[in-house]
């Protein structure tokens, strides 16, 4: 899985499902990072206070409701 890390908002997105509702496009490019490592994501959540995006992280569909 490919993840987009938004360091400005401290949010983790799943790139396959991220869209306009996630509003990561408001974060400057230099404050975004891409990762394929679930371990890195878990570390950010457990130790750095990052949250998962409500709009895309738990999604398994490309259809926006």
Image (spheres, rainbow, N blue to C red):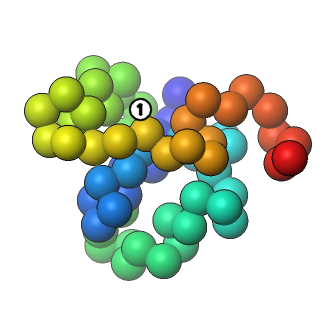
13 to 41, vertically: above or below = below
Measured as percent of width and height from the top left, residue 25 is found at 53, 72
For the image, the number of numbered tags is 1
What residue sits 56% from the left and 67% below the top? 23
* Foreground of the two, 39 or 53: 53
* Foreground of the two, 53 or 62: 53
Which residue appears farthest toward the top when viewing the image? 39
Q: Is residue 33 visible?
A: no
Residue topped by disc 1: 36
Quadrant of res 57: top right
What residue sits 35% from the left and 42% below the top? 51
Alpha-carbon neighbours of circle 1 within 10 Å: few (<14), some, or many (≥20)?
A: few
Measured as percent of width and height from the top left, residue 53 is found at 50, 45
What residue sits 41% from the left and 74% below the top? 27
Measured as percent of width and height from the top left, residue 34 is found at 40, 48
6 to 40, vertically: above or below = below
* Foreground of the two, 30 or 46: 46
Q: Is residue 14 visible?
A: yes
What residue sits 34% from the left and 62% below the top? 9
Horizontal relation, residue 27 to residue 8: left or right: right
Which residue appears farthest toward the left when viewing the image? 47
Measured as percent of width and height from the top left, residue 20 is found at 68, 65
**Disc 1, SS:** loop
């Amino acid at each position: 899985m490919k993840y987009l890390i938004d360091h400005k908002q401290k949010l983790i997105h799943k790139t396959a499902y991220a869209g306009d509702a996630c509003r990561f496009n408001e974060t400057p490019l230099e404050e975004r990072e891409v990762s394929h490592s679930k371990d890195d994501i878990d570390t950010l959540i457990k130790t750095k206070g990052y949250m998962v995006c409500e709009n895309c992280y738990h999604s398994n569909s490309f259809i926006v409701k």
